[in-house]
Amino acid sequence: MRAELEKIVGATAVDERPVRDLWPLAIMDERAGKAPPQILVVRPTGRDQVADVLRWATSNHVAVTPMGAGSGVCGALSPAAGEVVMDMGAFDRVLDIDETNLICRCEAGVNGFALEQQLNARGLTLGHYPSSLPGTTVGGLIATRSSGQESSRYGSIEDMLIGLAVVLPDGTFAAPRPGPRSAAGPALHQLLVGSEGGLGVMIGAVISLVQLLRGASRPHVAFLGRIQGTSRFSDRERHPDNELIPGVLIFRPESGLVYFNVDNVCKTILDRVSAEPALPKLVLLDLSAAPRVDLQSAQALGELAHELTAKHIQVQAVEARSSVRDRLRNEGVDTKLGGINRFRTVADAVEDFQKAAIR
Ligand SMILES: Cc1cc2nc3c(=O)[nH]c(=O)nc-3n(C[C@H](O)[C@H](O)[C@H](O)COP(=O)(O)OP(=O)(O)OC[C@H]3O[C@@H](n4cnc5c(N)ncnc54)[C@H](O)[C@@H]3O)c2cc1C
């Protein structure tokens, strides 16, 4: 069997190993000592190879399970001995991002998060954010009819899918015509949504995009200084005469923090910290101008705090609204951000820091 597969995809694109997804029962079985069987895994690099493997499998009555990133939790990827797994990892190209028609064409093995990041860099988003996004592929998202944390606003994967490129089990290639709507009954590509690899192997997809306002994906992060003779702080870009506090950098993101802008916000902060001649001792995050912090952003703020703390920089978030404080607490990141509460202001944190420095 292996030799025949190697003839189709090449020797380096076949290996043999246990394969499973993140189905809890499979994990428990493995922990209990029941290892999954060794499976032949093929990694085709093009449409013809996919078709040839499927033709070979059909004529030899061998089951083939397509594999994306393996983050499924329902055991769809639990092949039995003698079956074959088709790893779609080599189909990893984003072919085209059409900013005019708000459409993206990409291959099925593209990582969901990598795609989102490429879109965000252009002020676009897929609007699809399952919490497993970094561990998914576009093909896996479609095959599982995935839904995400933003789906009540942007829809689930089936709402943004416009067209598919699929190789059917007999090796036939099908590419239901991309279009926003089918007037002649159900659009054929929708048959594949949620098919869990049972109807064919998806090799590419056409997906609709959402345009973000430039400012929403790259919000201004004010760098604050003290207004002379007061205990108030404002943006040094507008008021360069505002005083700097030695050892302290104060940032105020001027937007709600959501999955498509939080990376830019964190990067702005980290870039500024690294550009300082000497690392600050305290980074203050004034969250008063962030009316919303979503789940991904809360986690990203936790990672930002982790990164700064590793550099021996203390991190303190202040002036967060109650809903933001709740979010940070629920995600368990409030302690990393200095244990936020409703009383502490930027001025209080600066005063405490200066008192501690004198002691
Ligand atoms: C911590 C965690 C959080 C999660 N959160 C969510 C969530 O919020 N929302 C959600 O919907 N899911 C969630 N999931 C489940 C999982 O991430 C999704 O089902 C995801 O879509 C699987 O993508 P994948 O690329 O890893 O697919 P895989 O696990 O590799 O495969 C899943 C199924 O898709 C089929 N398949 C994969 N690629 C193809 C292809 N190219 N052609 C045909 N069939 C294919 C496989 O055969 C299999 O049946 C979560 C999982 C974890 C571990």
Image (cartoon, rainbow, N blue to C red):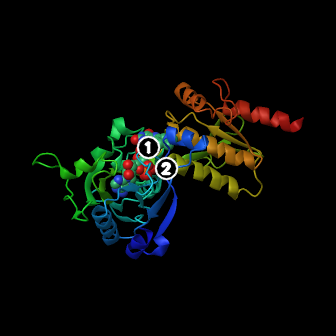
Q: Residue at x 43, y 73 (%)?
A: 3
Q: Residue at x 35, y 35 (%)?
A: 152
Is disc 2's CB within 8 Å of ligand 1? no
* Residue reaching furthest to the left: 184
Q: Please, what is the three-letter code of the amino acid marked with disc 1?
A: Gly
At which x and y percent is residue 212? 38, 49
Above or below residue 258? Residue 189 is below
Query: Is 238 on the left or on the right of 308, as rendered?
Result: left
Q: Amino acid at mark 2?
A: Arg
Per the rendering, the mark at residue 138 is: none
Q: Callout 2 environment at 10 Å: few (<14), some (14 to 19), or many (20+)?
A: many
**Which one is nearer the viewer's eye here, 169 or 235?**
169
2 or 1: tag closer to the N-terminus? 2
Q: Marks 2 and 1: CB-CB under 8 Å? A: yes
Q: How many marks?
A: 2
Q: Secondary structure at mark 2?
A: loop
Instruction: Give the left or right position of residue 157, taking residue 187 as reference.
Output: right
x, y percentage for residue 164? Answer: 27, 57
The residue identified by callout 2 is 20
